[in-house]
Amino acid sequence: MKAATHPNYRPVLFHETAADAFFLISSTAHTSSTQKHSDGNTYPYVALDVSSASHPVYTHQQRKATNEERIAGFNKRFAGFSAR
């Protein structure tokens, strides 16, 4: 095999921030930050917004917005506009 052809495949610590879950998985993800894991070792660190720990497809929980939440969100978004 040629040298420097393949990416660096190593253990990476992924942190899913919504569910505060950590996953230690081998990956080629590029990151400059590191974090200490519960096993005492320091690994490259990648923060995630959504993963299988919080996504409704994997958790089988549907989040339903009520009408009050939708109305409040609409009013917050368009509060600065005025009718002419």
Image (cartoon, rainbow, N blue to C red):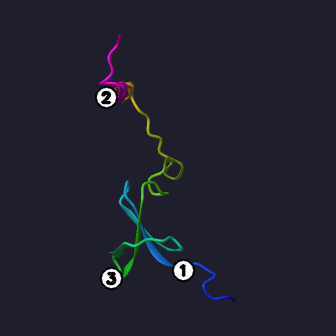
**Does residue 51 appear to the left or right of 74 in the view shown?**
right
- Number of numbered discs visible in the structure rendering: 3
CA gap, disc 3 and disc 2: 45 Å
> For numbered disc 3, what is the local secondary structure?
loop
Residue furthest top as drawn = 84
Relative to 36, is 53 above or below? above
Q: Nearer the viewer, residue 46 or 64?
A: 46
Disc number for residue 40? 3
Residue found at x 44% / y 35%: 64
Disc number for residue 8? 1
Type of the residue with mark 1: Asn
What residue does disc 2 label?
76
Q: How crowded is the residue under tag 2: few (<14 C-alpha within 10 Å), some, or many (20+)?
A: few
Q: Nearer the viewer, residue 13 or 1?
A: 1
Which of the 4 quarters of the picture holds residue 21? bottom left
Relative to 58, is 7 above or below? below
Type of the residue with mark 2: Lys
Relative to 59, is 67 above or below? above
Give the mark, 3 or 1, whose residue is nearer the N terminus. Answer: 1
> For numbered disc 2, what is the local secondary structure?
helix
x and y, in percent, of residue 4 in the image = 60, 84
